[in-house]
Amino acid sequence: MATVATPPPLPPESTKGKKWFWLIGLVVFFLVSGLFRHFRQDTHDPKTLKGSAPTPVSLATAHQADFPVWLTGLGTVTPVYTVTLKSRVDGELMKVYFKEGDRVHRGDPIVEIDPRPYQVQLAQAQGQLVHDQALLDNARIDLKRYQELIKTGAIPDQQLVTQQALVSQYEGTVTSDQSQVDNAKLLLIYCHITAPVNGRLGIRLVDQGNMILAAGNIGLVVLTQLDPITVIFPLPQDYLGDIQQGMNSPLAPLKVEAWDRSNQHLLATGELQTLDNQVDITTGMVKLRAQFVNRHDELFPNEFVNARVRVAVLPHATVIPVAGVQQGDQGPFVFVVDKNMKVSIRKVKPGPANGDEIAILSGVLPGERVVTEGVDNLRSGMTVTLAQRSSSTPAVSQ
């Protein structure tokens, strides 16, 4: 009978090695977990914070001022008058009195259409008027004589009636002739095209020597008035109440500023002129028009600008930099630093902003200092110090 061989038993050293491996792993795990909990406790413990080095921050002092409330919209520079000059008579373009880009005044000559055909028409109309006026004068003389003869019965009544009708006929003819003369004079005036408004001329659209048709759609040149000039810009309908209240306040007419596309350069300052009579239902916006003095062409037609209108002024408002307002789960707040350089968190109610500054309606008093830079990982109860700033960086008010 065959016997089955059995494997030899494991040596005791191999079992002990596995036990030691698991024991060392558990010890390392608990050590790491303990260190992690200890580290988290230290970072949140005010006592630990007190013992740590002060956090460098930048501070700004809240101050009191009359704070303007501005509403901003993207606007388009729009001329008050843009006129495409066209001819109202047919004829050859005989003379061009302007150069492209010239500034002209109302009444200055622009172009001249060949007037000779219309001078001939005027002469014909005047000749016909003289002829018919002579017939009328003669008929009136005969009528006056017939009126005397009828008293003595020298002529029949019908002859007098006929003469009266002839006088009326000639009077109508003379009136028609006079209208023909006036029309010929008007056409002759139309041959000389002048500037209807002050402004600047654009590119010439038709050259000298071309035949011009009054019924044509092509203009001769475009004249644009540049001074004064307007800006049309939309604002959300939510601001309608503020705008209308401002237009009826002592601030009226409301001040409007036009800035360049980058909002870096103030181009012109003007006044709010009017408010549109309806809201655009597709955008929920209402259009406003402001007028500006533009003597040096700061504003150019169809240019895009950032327009802002001052609708109100908050008197004695508490003002801080916009960078001082932080957003949290429970709303906006600021970090206030006391005289001992200790930090506390203060809930605030922000008001309107103006550039880099914002009005605080509640939560901060004038003279208190708020943190504007270095707010990362900042907590209530921490001690802070003023951050060192390079000489090229302006210091924040303290």
Image: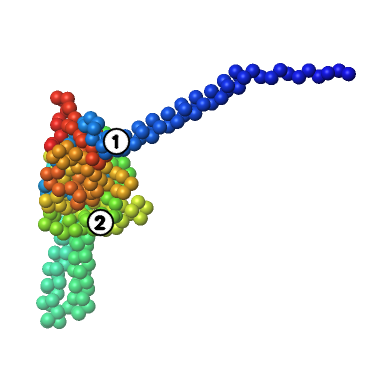
Q: Which residue is mark 2?
A: 240
Name the kind of residue labelled 1 in the image.
Asn
Q: Which residue is mark 1?
A: 377
Q: Residues within 10 Å of mark 1 (few under 14, many from 20)?
A: few
Could you tell me which residue is drawn at 20 percent across and 45 percent down?
358
**Disc 1, SS:** loop
* Residue 287 visible to the viewer: yes
Name the kind of residue labelled 2 in the image.
Leu
Using the image as rendered, state which of residue 169 and residue 115 is in the foreground: 115
**Where 237 sits versus 142, above or below?**
above
Could you tell me which residue is drawn at 25 percent across and 54 percent down?
239
Q: Which mark is residue 355?
A: none
**Disc 2, SS:** helix
Residue 138, given in percent of the width and then of the height, sits at 14, 65
Could you tell me which residue is drawn at 15 percent across and 52 percent down?
314
Q: Which quarter of the figure is the C terminus placed in?
A: top left
**In the drawing, does residue 263 fall left or right of residue 23?**
left
Using the image as rendered, state which of residue 123 and residue 107 is in the foreground: 107
Using the image as rendered, state which of residue 348 and residue 246 is in the foreground: 348
Q: Which quarter of the figure is the N terminus placed in?
A: top right
| Colour logic | rainbow
Residue 229, given in percent of the width and then of the height, sits at 18, 44
Give the Cα separation between the discs numbered 2 and 1. Answer: 41 Å
- Counting residues from the start of the chain, the first of labels 2 and 1 encountered is 2
